[in-house]
Amino acid sequence: MSTHTETTLVPGLRARRARSGRIRGGAAPYIFIAPFYVLYGLFMIVPVVAAIVLSLTEWVGLGAPDFIGIQNYVDLAHDTSFGGALANSAVYTAIAVLIVVPVSLLVAQALNARNLRLRDMFRVAYFVPMVLSPIVIALIYSLIFDRDYGLLNSSLQALFGLPHIDWLGDPTIAKGAIGFVLMWRTVGYLTIFFLAALQNVPGELYEAAALDGAGPVRSFFTVTLPSIRPVTAFVIVTSFISAAQLFDEPYLLTKGGPGEATLSVAMFIYRAAFERQQFGYAAAAGVVLFAIVFIISQGLNRLLGIGRES
Amino acid sequence: MTAFAQTREAAHSAQPSPTRKRRGGAVARRALLYITLIALLLVFIAPLLWALSGSLKRRGDIFSVPPSLIPNPLTFENYVNLLTTQPFAAWFGMSVGTALLATAISVFVCALAGYGFAKFRFRGKRVLFTVMFSSLSIPFAVILVPLFILVTKSGLANPWFSLIVPWVAPAFGIFMMQQFIVQSVPDDIIEAARIDGCSEFGTFWRIVLPLLRPSLGALAVWSFLQSYNSFMWPLVLVSDSNQYTLPLGLNILFASENRSYDLVLAGAVLASIPTILVFILLRKQLLEGLTAGAVKG
C-alpha cells in the first residue's frame, strides 16, 4: 500500500517468481493468500472504485450524493488552486528525482570506498531520519527555519551578521526549504539501496575498465551505472511516487503558503474534503492524481526497464 | 575508488619522486572523503541534537542569541509540564498500541500470502500478483476520502479499528516475505513435512515461520514505522484529543496559540525514543531486509 512515507517495490521479483512456486496445493494457496486479499479488497480496491464513483457526484457528507457527471473534472480543469497544487507537486517530484536521488548515489559511492572505517556507523546514522516521524522532523525544522527566532537565522546572524531571511514566507525559498526537508528525511534511506547495489558490482568489471585506461569518472558511467540500473530504476520510481503524495511537510511547515505557493495535491484533496466538505470534488482530484502518478510511474518503469528480464 | 585513483596517478607519475606524490594524493583523497562523510553526519545529527538540547532548556533559553548547544541551566521542566498538562501518556499509548496491533496483523497476513506466492503454483496467480503489484503506485491521498467515508459510516469508528485500517495489508510486505521465503525455505522441507502428514497450515506454522524469524523482524519494524509515524490518516479521523496519536498531539501543541515549542520539543524527543530504540536493536535485519530483494533480484 502506498503511504505518505515509503513504498517499496522490488525489481526482479517477477523473474524470480517464475522460477519459484512449483508446489501444487489444491485449495491451500488460496487459503494462504485469502486474508490479504479480503483486507486488500475492502481497504484498497473498494475505496479506489468508490473514489471514481464519488468523483462523479456532488456530496457534502450528508444525505444522498447528487450525480453530476464529469462536472467535477470540468471544474478542476478551471481551478487555478488545483493547477497550482499540481505544479507544486511537480516541483517536489522533480527535487526528489533530480536532486535527492543523485545525492543519495553520491553518498553511497562515498560509503562504498575501499577500507572505509566506520562504514556501518555512517550508514546507520544517515538512516536515522527515516525512523523518525515526518511530523517530528517538520516540527524541528519549522523551529529552525523560523524567521524571527529560528536557529538558522540566528546562527547566520551570529556568524556572518546576515539579515534574517524569511525561509518559509517567500514563495520560491519555501518550496526549496520543503525540498530540503524532504531530502534530509529520505537521503539515508535511498543511500542504503544504492550502497547494497554498489557492493554487488563485481570487482573484475572495474579492473577491466582500469586496464582499458578508464579513469574514475568514465568507469562510473560505463561500469557502475549500467550495473546498478535495476536498483536505480526502483529508487527513482519509489521517490517519484512518495514525493507526488507529499503532505506532512507542506502541511506543517507552511500550511501550503505563502498564499498557496507550497500547496501540494494531497493538501488540496485534504482541504477540499475536510475543510470545505466537497467530498465529490476531493475524490475527483484524487482520481486525477492517481491517473498522473500511474501513467508517469508506468512510463518510468518502461523507460528504466523495471520488470525486464536481465 | 582509491584503486582507480592510484592507477590513474600511476599513469601520470613520470615526475620526480612518484611514490611520495602518489601517497600524498591518496592521503588527501582519504581526508576529503572522511571530511565529507563527517560533515554529512553533522547535517543529519545536528538538528536532532539541537532538538534534544532545546528540550532540556528553559522555555526562554531555547532561542537564545547566539544559539548554544549545551543547556544552561539544564532542566526537565518541559518534560514535567508536558506529562502533567497534556494527555501525552494517552497519545503515546494510542500510537504504540495501534502500531503494535497493525504490525501483528500485517506481519501475519503478509507471511501467509508471501508463502502462498513463493511456494505454490495455482490458477490466477499472475493476475492476483499484478493486482497487488499495481497498488504500489496508488497514492494514499487517492483513497483518503472514500476510506474515511467507509470507516466512519460503517459504524466501526472505534479508533483501534479505524486507525490501523490503512496498514494491515501492505503489498510491500508480501514482496519482502516472498523474497525471503524463496531464499531461505527449500521446497524439500515442505515436501518432507507433507509426507510426514503435516497439514498445510501446520507446515507453515511449525516449519516455515521459524525459518523466517530474522526477516519477520525486518517486516515488523517496517510495519511499525509505517503506522507509528503516520499523520494524514489520524488527522482526518480522530477528533477526541484523548484519542490522538503522537504526531497529532504534537501538531496540535505546535498549532496552539502560544506555540508551545518547549512542550513540542520534549514531546518530539519522547515520541522518537521507541522508534530509535527499535531501529538500533534491529538495524541489521531492517537494512538487510529492505535491500535484499532489490539487489539479489
Image (cartoon, grey):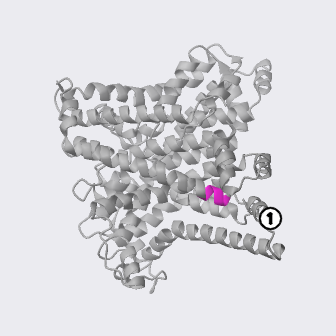
Along the horizontal axis of the image, is A83 left or right of A184? left
Question: Is A110 within the magenta?
Answer: yes
- In the picture, measured across the screen, residue B150 lies left or right of residue B36, that is left
In the foreground, B273 or A105: A105
> Taking A290 as reference, is A99 above or below it?
below
- Is any part of residue A285 visible from this angle? yes
| Rendered image quadrant of residue A166 | bottom left
As helix, strand or loop, the secondary structure at mark 1 comes to: helix
The correct choice, above or below, for A185 with respect to B150 in the image is: below
Image spot of residue A244 (x, y percent): 39, 44
Q: Nearer the viewer, residue A227 or A291?
A: A227
- Residue under the image location 31 percent in, 37 percent down: B148
Estimate the x, y position of residue A19 in percent, counting from the top left: 70, 24
Crowding near pointer 1: few (<14 within 10 Å), some, many (20+)?
Answer: some
Residue at mark 1 = B10
Q: Residue at x 28, y 34 (%)?
A: A283
Q: Quadrant of residue A272?
A: top left
Closer to us: A25 or B157:
A25
Start and end of the magenta stretch? A107-111
Q: Residue at x 55, y 60 (%)?
A: A128
Residue type indicated by callout 1: Ala
Residue depicted at x 52% and y 29%: B133
Q: Chain of mark 1?
A: B
